[in-house]
Structures are given as C-alpha cells and as structure tokens.
Amino acid sequence: MNRRKPFVALLCAVFAALMNLNASAQESVTPAAQDEVQPTTVRFYAWAGSAEVNAYIQWASRELAESNRINLHHVKVADISEAVALVLANSAGESDAVDLLWINGENFAALKNANRLVGGLEAKVPNSRLIRSDLDWHVDFGTAVEGFELPWGIAQLQLIMHTKHVAPEQTVVTPQALLELAKGSPGRFSYPKPPSFHGTSWLKALAFQLTDNPAILTQPAEPAIIDEVLRPLWDYLDRLHPYLWHQGTEFPISAGRQRQLFNQGVVDNTVTFNPNEVRALQLQRKLAPDARSLSIGARALTNFHYLAVPRASRRQHGALEVINFLLSPRAQARKADPQGWADPSVIRLPQRDLESPDPLVASHPEPHVSWNAVLEQQWLARYQR
C-alpha cells in the first residue's frame, strides 16, 4: 500500500496541473470564441437600380442572418464606380468601408491593376467548384480574372421585338435584316443612346458582327487600327439612322426609357441584357405578351457580373461566406426565378429548380475595355454634333 502513495500523489498533481491549464486556456479562448459567434456586418456595395435586384439582395440578407449570422448590408449605388473610387483612394489601408463589390469590366480592371483585391477566390470559396464548366468567365472585358473575382450572374445582349416582325422559329436577327425591317417600318426602331450602358453595348455587338476580324476587338484599341476596325460600324449606322425613331437625331436615354416606348407602342423594339427578362416581365404583366427576344447575329455579346473582395476589408471571412452562399444552388435558383430577378444562374441547377430551358445562346466576349471609350467618343462626335 505504501508503495502506491507516490503514484497516487503523482496522479493528483497531474490532474491539478491539467485543471489549471484548462482554466487558463478557457480564459484565452472563450473571448475569441464569443467574438466568432457575434453577427458580422458585411457591407455589400451593389447597383440598386432595379426593384427585383434589391428584393433579391434583401432575401439573401435574411437568409444569411438566420443561417450564417452575417448582417449583409446593401450599400445602394447608382454606379459601382462610386465604390471603386473609395477603394482606390484607400492607398494606405486607413479605410475599410467596402467589404464586397458587385463588379466587372473597367472597374475590375482598375482595382486589379492597383492591387486592391483579394486573390485566390476559387480556393477560398467552396461553391466556386459548382460554376458551369462551359462558361468562359475567366476573361472580363479583356482583363484576365486570375482569381480576383468570381461570377455570380450572366448577361447577354438581346433584341426584344414584336412577333409581327419575326417568324415563330426565329432566334436571330442579323444587322442587315434589322436594316431591312427599319426600312419597311420607318420611325419604329431605335436603340439606347450611348454612352448609356446598353447603348454602348449595342455599338459593341454591331462592331463584332460587322468587322472582318472580330478577334481584334478583344485586344487593346491601338490608334493605328481603330479607324479600319470601326469603319463598317459607322457605315452601317449611317445607313440605318434615317429610318429610326426621329430619323436617328434623337435616341432613348436608357434601355428603361426605350422599354417604356416599346410598351406604349411608340417603337417596335427594345434591348435587354438579361435573356430571361422577356419571360419574367410577361409573367409579371410588365411587357407585351407578343414580345420576343432575339440574338443580334449568330452570337450574342455576353459578359458576367462578378463578386470581389477589397484587400482593405477587415471582414474578408464574412465577405467570402456571402460569396459562397450566393453561389449555392438555393441562392442561384432564387436569383433565376422568373417571378423575381430572373438573372441566369452560373451553376448547373437541377431541372426541378427550372421552369424553362437554358435561355443562353451562342456567345462572343466583350471587347477589350479600351474600346468602350473609343466607341462612345466617336459615336458622340459623329451623331450628336
């Protein structure tokens, strides 16, 4: 019995030491654990020009608050360049007002080139593996994505027309066919005025269709080639404009305004960057029931809207959780719902989540971002003197 006392004493000593170690560990770990379960506010800077988009983000905010303890705050902007200016001004990291951005094109290029974005997003966002492999999203307006943003929606420029102008099976209208339609119905066609987003997109889509070398548009706009590349576009518009609404001397200020003119019967066409939009608006009784969407040429101008996280954000983990949720099947199916936003999914959804087939048609990419300013400046100089 006496020989066991040292062993028992040793056990007691070890137990006491473990208890003390556990107590000290609790003192250091508990506050951090408590911090982790506190709701994280993620400030999401996103365009707010659509009631359907705003409603979708509100839905996502409620879902994230319940399941992820994230307070997603939609900072509503008319143009995301407002948020980009904030991030670019933050040269020393003294401000972290922006946690998450809805972004693409020129704005992405500016932030990537300034090294203001978190990289490696595909490895940090598990649901990125669900993104459709057939989507060519790795180049954004001529700028390589390289892990600094992830797509969460798809845009394709399509023409909306009344069925009186198209055959039942028709899905494409070529530039030449559109010119003939305009000649046959003078004053009934138009397009949004550049440099509005849809107006400039209209110019880019036509430039791709009319040039002999469309691949050159994916390269930077070098002064030596600009006139040659764009000459077919300006020649075409010179022939088209006399047959447009107001003989091409006046244009709808936006796609929204042209939609109003279309619904009022003033013009016979409008445009959309959402291939689901015709069906969605008809279900919502916001568009004429005989409206149809068609690709301008055999391939449609296509781009993606992306999500990106500024490096200066102190809530990067929360922002990544938001991206992961927005790429989930539930969130993507909700976004594609024709009764809501109707924005096409970037992941392959189960058929039970879809009420219609894939609305996307064959595509071509956006021109290099440098062509935007060239097209806008030359259009204004030629047609708005």
Image: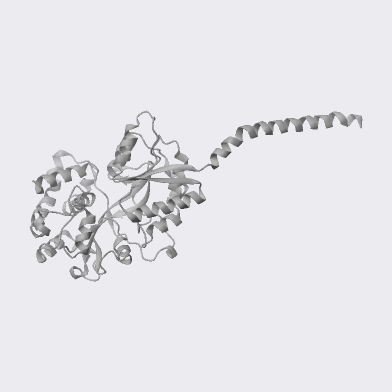
Chosen colour scheme: one colour
Of all residues, the one furthest to the right in this rendering is 1
Residue 102 point in image, percent of width and height:
35, 46
**Quadrant of residue 19 in the image?**
top right
Residue 42 point in image, percent of width and height:
43, 42
Pick whichever, 379 or 35, lies toward us. 35
Can residue 253 be seen here? The reply is yes
Q: Is residue 293 left or right of residue 147?
A: left
Q: Is residue 56 above or below residue 376?
A: below
Pick whichever, 20 or 294, lies toward us. 20
Can residue 132 be seen here? The reply is no
Residue 49 point in image, percent of width and height:
30, 51
Pick whichever, 17 or 250, lies toward us. 250
Q: Is residue 265 above or below residue 14?
A: below
The image quadrant where one finds the N terminus is: top right
Give the total number of marks visible in the rendering.
0
**Quadrant of residue 292 in the image?**
bottom left
Residue 213 point in image, percent of width and height:
18, 49
Q: Is residue 5 above or below residue 204?
A: above
Q: Is residue 361 left or right of residue 323?
A: left
